[in-house]
Amino acid sequence: MVALPLLGLSAGCDAILGPAQPDSDWRSHESAHFSLFVRPGSFCEANRVRLAEVLDDQYATTLDRLGITYSGRISAFLHASTADAALGFEYGGLGYPATEALRATCLAPLGGQLFSLLSHEANHVIQWNAMGRPGTYFMSEGLASAVMSTRFHGLGKESFWEWTTSHASAIPPLSTLIDDAKWGGSDLEYRASVSFVAYLIERAGPAPIRQLFQVKSAQFPARLEVLYGRSLEDLERDWRAFCAARPRI
Amino acid sequence: MNSPFLRTAAFLSLFQMIAVPASAQDATGTSAPASSGVTWRFEAGRNSLWIRDVARSRLGQGVDASPVSWEAHGAAVTVERDHSSARRLHRIQASFEQAADAVFRSPLAASARPAGDGAIRVAGSIERGSYPFVDLGVAGFDVGFSLQGGAEWTSVIQHFDPAIEVRVTEANLTTGVAAVARLRRWRRVHLDAAWVNGSVLVRTTTQHSAAVEANVHDWGIGWLTDVTVRAHARVSSTVAISASYFGTDRGRFVSHGASASGRRRWTVGVSYAR
């Protein structure tokens, strides 16, 4: 450990902790709400029209379902491969609200997994800029997929509710999921947060969600009870029962 | 968007402990005069600022920063009181910077941001150190180190369509260790340089015009790397003119609000030695 500060002194904090400069090997294509940056000759460039269509549809859906106002233009950087994205995992993306940008791996096939990934990252940008910085990872990640449009794919709220029933025993209690100190960013945590937040919107509409978006972990249970008239534990039972009662897709 | 930054935090915490109560803020190497008198220096010029939001940090692999940067440009003013001697370095500095004319710069193009986008920064720092290596290899070339500490207040305003205003205010305390060098080989012209690395204790307040919470407060940590290069040309026994470059790169780790940023400042001015 002593070597770390010595390394910092020899190379400089910036060399170790600073960001790399983005390269310029991109082509840009404009849609109604997005500037798509794609690699020349890539799968994403060939499918840019459909991707733009999916993202513009999601943009309008998110504003409508949350009752929010935002009209910023988002720059979406679509990497041609896992190595190109260099995210440290095979498939994924990141959103950058303050600079109205996102970047993601953009791999074949052209379908629900890719559409939902790009929509999720775009929703981060839209929601943070329209509602402020989220207070928990639970709300940030949950809401980004809870308002997913199903016009071009089937990975909407119904699929998350069905998943909840089939994975009920594996899902940690909500009291754990809402705690940022315990959030690990696993697929299980993501899906459970999406399912519960979508349930809250289904139950009481978008207004309480806007009130809850910025609430931090410590205040989350109390604010939830004020907004929904039910404790966190009661709402968790309601949610699990709701999911179990849904018809199979 | 998951960004715990735990390993980075551990590194910076350890760095801060080992770095003694150092500090860094607009560190300006040393412009040590030959005598031990007090020198006042006033400079003014231009500065530029860039900010990229960070979604995730992985120690040793840099950070996942946005491919788009928010950039702005404006004026800068600095005032220094230098009480250095042949081997000792003692300086107090204050600075003011303003930036506007903001753009989003992507790898392919820049697009103008609303006229209200901009930044203001007020900072002060104190620096103490010494030159244990005098005439190192070349007559008049001295190398040393210093410990620096500072405080700064910054405010960055951004606007998003259609009418959303986001104001992020930071109150920071900085500490750092500087490697400093100076070249006093000639009678009228001196050169100084400093390279500083350190840590930052961050307190942010975010105001978002469309958010439910009017003010959101957070604590965080950060790092800094500063570089200063300055040339002095003496025009009389008490007066000199100077030209300076100051660059700093920063990282800020706040829950759900990390960023990387950088500033570049070019100033010219005059100094008066009593």
Image (cartoon, grey):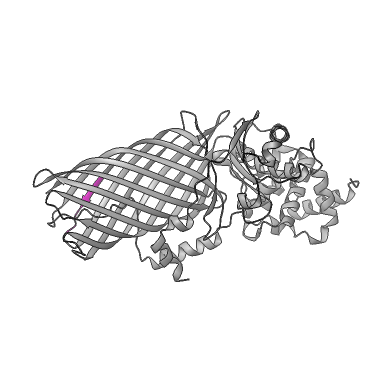
- Identity of the residue drawn at 43% across and 65% down: A7
Number of on-image labels? 0
- Which of the pair B274/A187 is nearer the observer? A187
Looking at the image, can residue A209 be seen? Answer: no
Quadrant placement of the C terminus of chain A: top right
Residue A147, image x, y percentages: 74, 40
Residue B83 belongs to the span the image colors magenta: yes
Residues shaded magenta:
B79-85
- Which of the pair B8/B40 is nearer the observer? B8
Is residue A154 shown left or right of residue B266?
right
- Which of the pair A2/A39 is nearer the observer? A39
Q: Is residue B24 above or below residue A123?
A: below
Q: Is residue B189 above or below residue A7?
A: above
Residue B235 belongs to the span the image colors magenta: no
Is residue A188 shown left or right of residue B153?
right
- Identity of the residue drawn at 26% across and 52% down: B92
Residue A57, image x, y percentages: 72, 32
- Which of the pair B147/B187 is nearer the observer? B187
Residue B237, image x, y percentages: 8, 47
Q: Is residue B10 above or below residue A221?
A: below
Is residue B207 shown left or right of residue A63?
left
Residue farthest to the left?
A: B237
- Identity of the residue drawn at 62% across and 32% down: A29
